[in-house]
Amino acid sequence: MGLPNASGDLSTEVEVDAFRRLFPLRFFEKHLLESIRPDARPLGRARDTTIALGAVASANGSALAKIGSTTMLAAIKMEVMTPSMETPDEGCIAIDFHMPPICSPIVRPGRPAEAAPVVAKQLSDTILSSGMINLKELSLVSGKAAWMAYLDIYCLDADGALFDAALLAAVAAFSHLEIPVVSLNDDGKIVLSEGQGLSDREPVNKEKRKVNLGSIPFSLTCILHKNHILADPTSEEESIMETFVTVVLDSSSQLVSLYKPGGPVLAYTSAIQDCIALTRQRVKELRKILEEAISGMEVD
Amino acid sequence: MEIDREDGRSQNQLRPLACSRNILHRAHGSASWSQGDTKVLAAVYGPKAGTKKNENPEKACIEVIWKPKTGQIGKLEKEYEMILKRTLQSICILTVNPNTTTSVMIQVVNDDGALLPSAINAACMALVDAGIPMRHLAVSICCCVARSGLVILDPTKLEEQKMKAFAYLVFPNSVHSVLPEGSPSVQGEPIENGIITSVTHGTMSVDDYFYCLERGRAASTKLSDFLRRNLQQQSTNSSKAG
């Protein structure tokens, strides 16, 4: 194999773009040696992150989160349901994650993306086990009626770190969620009491209210490559270096998930500690971004 | 501090392990793995010519098909398929048979906790049985964190549900080195301490996780001894038969 040497000679001659396409790994490693990434970020820094609350007017709670160009739209629709026999005084959250063909050239129309069910499962595991939402709070009448929260997350642009962006969008949508006012009608059924027409009936819950969020989970995905740790990878980086570690910490620094699905690089204790330290920093950043988004909404 | 387990095991005690290989006639390699009442069958077909779409044709491709005990496959099974695929990809030498696909079928016979670790162990043994080139074996273990911070190994399904959190960990098997300098190490840690796969459920403190790692590593040496003994035994048996 004369390739590595050939690329070494070529790197001084061919154009940068051509070199990037022909020898992507060499291209990245040359950057990593200088502790910089092709998009001018240091290795440990995440991309710019923005949150816009209330992006979907018809939903009870919604948010649009962007990490770099990865874009996620999350919306929550509340419906009244009969709680199951085992948990009569608890509501329910159903989480789904969609990757339409618009999000990436890899996803073809008609054929669902392989990553979508995996991210959906990870999201529901994380959100339910973090205890962010107290399911008892979603109860209306014990054993009779409770809220079912349908959380749907659409990936509009898949440019790496899908789980991080999806979780951020989900958390932001929950912080924007307002539970609508409902009342019991004469048949003992729960009806939405919109407007003043039904004011003669006693509402089950007095006013629109926010859900109390417990400890909020935030996540950071890192790529391990040789001795380097790259935070918040783009899809290009993900396709070239294939070892990911996703750490989810909640606001009280408890570990909600440490997810490393295989990959050619083994994670040693020191690498795991570094990833957790990077995540701690990122949690602070994300909390600030979320708080700013929420306070921005209150001013409006 | 002690913790009472329903089946009377101590906290570090695994359930009885059993593994047999070459149990299916049509498959190129097969293995059954059981830990207590959890039992998994794995079958390997391949390498077959060609890779699937979106896979790198310069490398061998591994596909995993997960068959649950009953019912249709859902998100959980899809996630298991993905984790298993990526774990097996990391232990196989993919450049030996480029542009081929190796299919690994996992059939759950009974689920009584630690299902994914059992499936990983079974798949690994089936790959050995099929003669797929591998760097090393993968040894998988489930650690449970109780509310008191104690860690118990190899939980049953009931224990998994009762406990605060659990972690599925996969390590490389311990290297049986003939060289005097012992097993190779990276950054001062032996290679079998590196994590191939880690999946956690439930919240725990960061220290709890590192404690899990420590206990898991200790147990994985026992498990890899078991794997090695099992492979040696059956290879001598088959050479006698041949």
Image: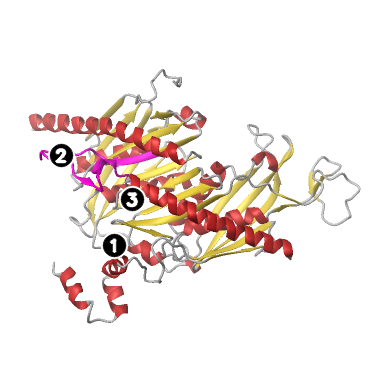
Chain letter for mark 3, please.
B
Q: Position of residue A225 (x, y in %)?
A: 31, 57
Amino acid beneath label 2: Gly
Q: Residue at x 45, y 21 (%)?
A: B1
Asked whether residue B118 is in view, the answer is: no
Q: Residue at x 34, y 28 (%)?
A: B35
Q: Identify the magenta region.
A: B168-196
Do marks 3 and 2 share a chain? yes
Q: Earlier in the sequence, mark 3 or mark 1?
A: 1
User: Circle 2 is placed at which residue position?
Assistant: B182
Chain letter for mark 2, please.
B
Categorize mark 1 by other alpha carbons within 10 Å: few (<14), some (14-19), many (20+): few
* Identity of the residue furthest to the top in this view: B8
User: Circle 1 is placed at which residue position?
Assistant: B56
Amino acid beneath label 3: Arg
Asked whether A146 or B107 is in front, the reply is A146
Amino acid beneath label 1: Asn
User: Circle 3 is placed at which residue position?
Assistant: B86
Q: Position of residue A193 (x, y in %)?
A: 82, 52
Chain letter for mark 1, please.
B
Answer above or below: position of A131 versus A8: above
Q: Position of residue A228 (x, y in %)?
A: 32, 58
Horizontal placement of B136 versus A142: left or right?
left
